[in-house]
């Protein structure tokens, strides 16, 4: 006799009985028509894995609310099934059923889908300009560097090379000499 080992836990939510599992693994293959009408393929993309579980669990309201709260948390988890181990899964859909015979038991179909998580990395610029690709201010950068006194062009005062422009900057006038009083500057003499 052969036994199939599987997890009776969906994330942190225990279920009493797993009735069935449905596994889906798909590869999307592109098809491009050419002049003669024949289709060629030039690319294939792995689609997210999908798993459908039919479950039954005692304590219908508590189990349903726990599954719904876990779904809303959007926390990726791993699940062990009779065929394989799935990582980075999310609860996509909960389809619960109740009837008069099984009013205290939650009978539900749970759709799980893999989340494909990627990371971002930066590589050094092959032109060797000293800046990394993706860093502000590099020769091949897509964003500008923050203004600074060191980067100010000739003729632009270093104090004007700040990143902010404040109200009234357009009509800036030079300050009066320190030995002149404000009243004397306003009224002359």
Image (cartoon, rainbow, N blue to C red):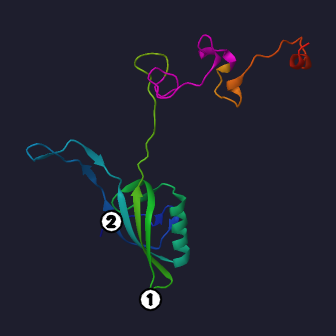
Compare residues 127 and 45 and report the one nearer the observer. 127
Instruction: Return the x and y of residue 84 as percentages of the image width and height.
Output: 35, 57
Q: Secondary structure at mark 2?
A: strand
For residue 101, the mark is 1
Compare residues 42 and 111 and report the one nearer the observer. 42
Instruction: Return the x and y of residue 42 as percentages of the image width and height.
Output: 21, 41
Residue in the picture at 47% in, 73% down: 16
Q: Secondary structure at mark 1?
A: loop
Can you say which quadrant of the picture contains the N terminus?
Answer: bottom left
Q: Along the horizontal axis of the image, is 140 left or right of 186?
A: left
Query: Cα distance, mark 2 to mark 1?
Result: 26 Å
133 falls in the magenta region: yes
Query: In which image quadrant can residue 148 be found?
Result: top right
Near mark 1 (Cα within 10 A), the count class, few <14, some 14-19 or many ≥20, is few
For residue 22, the mark is 2
The image shows a total of numbered marks equal to: 2
Question: Quick check: 103 above or below 70?
Answer: below
Question: Quick check: 86 above or below 57?
Answer: above
Residue 59 can be seen in this image:
no
Chief secondary structure of the magenta span? loop
Residue in the picture at 10% in, 47% down: 38
Residue in the picture at 28% in, 54% down: 26
Upstream in the sequence, badge 2 or badge 1? 2
Residue in the picture at 86% in, 13% down: 178
Name, please, the residue furthest toward the bottom. Answer: 100
Residue 41 can be seen in this image:
yes
Magenta range: 132-159
Near mark 2 (Cα within 10 A), the count class, few <14, some 14-19 or many ≥20, is few
Instruction: Return the x and y of residue 6 as percentages of the image width and height.
Output: 40, 64
Query: In which image quadrant can residue 171 be found?
Result: top right
Compare residues 145 and 4 and report the one nearer the observer. 145
Instruction: Return the x and y of residue 89 as percentages of the image width and height.
Output: 43, 56
């Amino acid at each position: 006799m052969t036994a199939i080992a599987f997890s009776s836990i969906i994330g942190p939510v225990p279920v009493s009985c797993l009735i069935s599992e449905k596994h889906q693994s798909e590869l999307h293959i592109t098809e491009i028509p050419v002049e003669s009408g024949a289709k060629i393929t030039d690319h294939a993309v792995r689609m997210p894995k999908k798993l459908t579980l039919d479950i039954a669990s005692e304590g219908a309201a508590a189990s349903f609310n726990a599954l719904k709260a876990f779904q809303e948390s959007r926390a990726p988890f791993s699940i062990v099934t009779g065929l394989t181990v799935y990582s980075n899964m999310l609860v996509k859909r909960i389809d619960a059923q109740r009837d008069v015979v099984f009013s205290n038991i939650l009978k539900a179909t749970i759709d799980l889908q893999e989340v494909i998580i990627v990371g971002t990395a930066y590589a050094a610029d092959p032109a060797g300009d000293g800046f990394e690709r993706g860093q502000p201010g590099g020769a091949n950068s897509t964003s500008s560097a923050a203004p600074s006194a060191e980067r100010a062009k000739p003729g632009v005062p270093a104090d004007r090379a700040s990143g902010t422009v404040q109200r009234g900057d357009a009509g800036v006038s030079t300050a009066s000499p320190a030995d002149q009083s404000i009243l004397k500057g306003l009224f002359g003499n």
